[in-house]
Amino acid sequence: MKKLFIVFILLFLLAGCTDILNVWKTKDKIRAVATTTFIADFLKNIAGDHLEVNVIMKEGSNHHAFEPTIRDARIIGTSDIIFINGMSLEGEWLGQMLISIDSEDKVVVTAEGIQSRPLVHTDHVHADGDPHVWHSTINAQMVVDNITRGLVAYDPDNRAFYEANAEAYNAQLDELTEQVEAILAVVPTERRKLVTSHEAFGYFADQFGFEVIGTIIIATQSQEPDRRQMQSIIERIAYFEVPAIFTETTMNSRLAEQIANETGVQLVPNLYSDSLGTLGTEGDTYIKMMLYNARTIAAGLS
């Protein structure tokens, strides 16, 4: 921990003392940091052109394996306002960076107030609960409200603009909820059983009436599942008659493919979990991502 702290201090000082990395395009807008692509998309809908947004964990990033760069340190150190998920999603690296700067008044925790789900592994418990809050549209609306309050506190002159946009976007999320429910209506109750690459869809399952039977990769904190754990997942798939195994765009599918082969269960690829998709894909906005995931799950289970 101490060594990591020193490394980040040095990285931040180096980043702050060089002009090599020009991380902001303009001086005329509020310089905002979003740690995730989901937060960045919400910011775009609420703040429009009032902000320049830099995203730390970009499209395709897996927050479990993310390692920040010197550029990331410079982005955070030179920002005006920082929007984070919270619930320990960002990990120790963010805490070390924030210690290095006067960040107390410019950090907005977007998951604040959300009732977290417990997240328990075989060898450890996530004290702050499951951080994947965005897979519930209800939670997404709370995130939007938290972002809006943060923007208004920083830039009160544009309060009406932010609040009007947030209200309009939350109305879109109400419509999204209805669309997702309609898409998933084709899945019979007895087939609403999810096995995914890792534990990202608990909030989705809670909101839309699914049961998470198991996950494949994140079974322990420091290693892949051993054969005993793999066998346990295989047995649960058979016992609960799980119709499909879903993989994710940010996770290696090798183990899922192996389990699918052993169980004879179909493998359905490429749910969006930890990140939005790149521009032009079916998951390049939050709303498109939720609709794509719903259609993919419905097709795999119905």
Image (cartoon, rainbow, N blue to C red):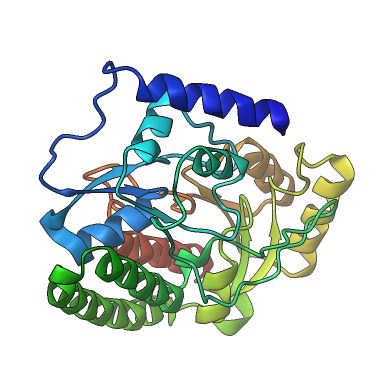
Q: Is residue 166 above or below residue 9?
A: below
The residue located at (19%, 62%) in the rendering is 47
- Residue 295 position, x and y percent, is 38, 65
Q: Nearer the viewer, residue 11 or 198?
A: 11
Q: Quadrant of residue 186?
A: bottom left
Residue drawn at x 53%, y 31% as measured from the top left: 67
Q: Quadrant of residue 144?
A: bottom left
| Residue 159 in the figure: left or right of residue 297 | left
Give the quarter of the figure containing the N terminus. top right
Is 174 in front, or is 163?
Answer: 163
Residues 243 and 161: in front is 161
Q: Is residue 12 left or right of residue 255?
A: left
Query: x%, y% of residue 261?
Result: 68, 43
Is 141 on the left-hand or right-hand side of 123?
left
- Horizontal and vertical percent for residue 194? 61, 65
Give the x, y percent position of residue 107.
42, 56
Residue at 86% x, 40% y is 227
Q: Relative to 160, does residue 61 appear above or below in the rendering? A: above
Q: Is residue 231 above or below residue 4?
A: below
Question: Of 37 and 194, which appears nearest the observer?
Answer: 37
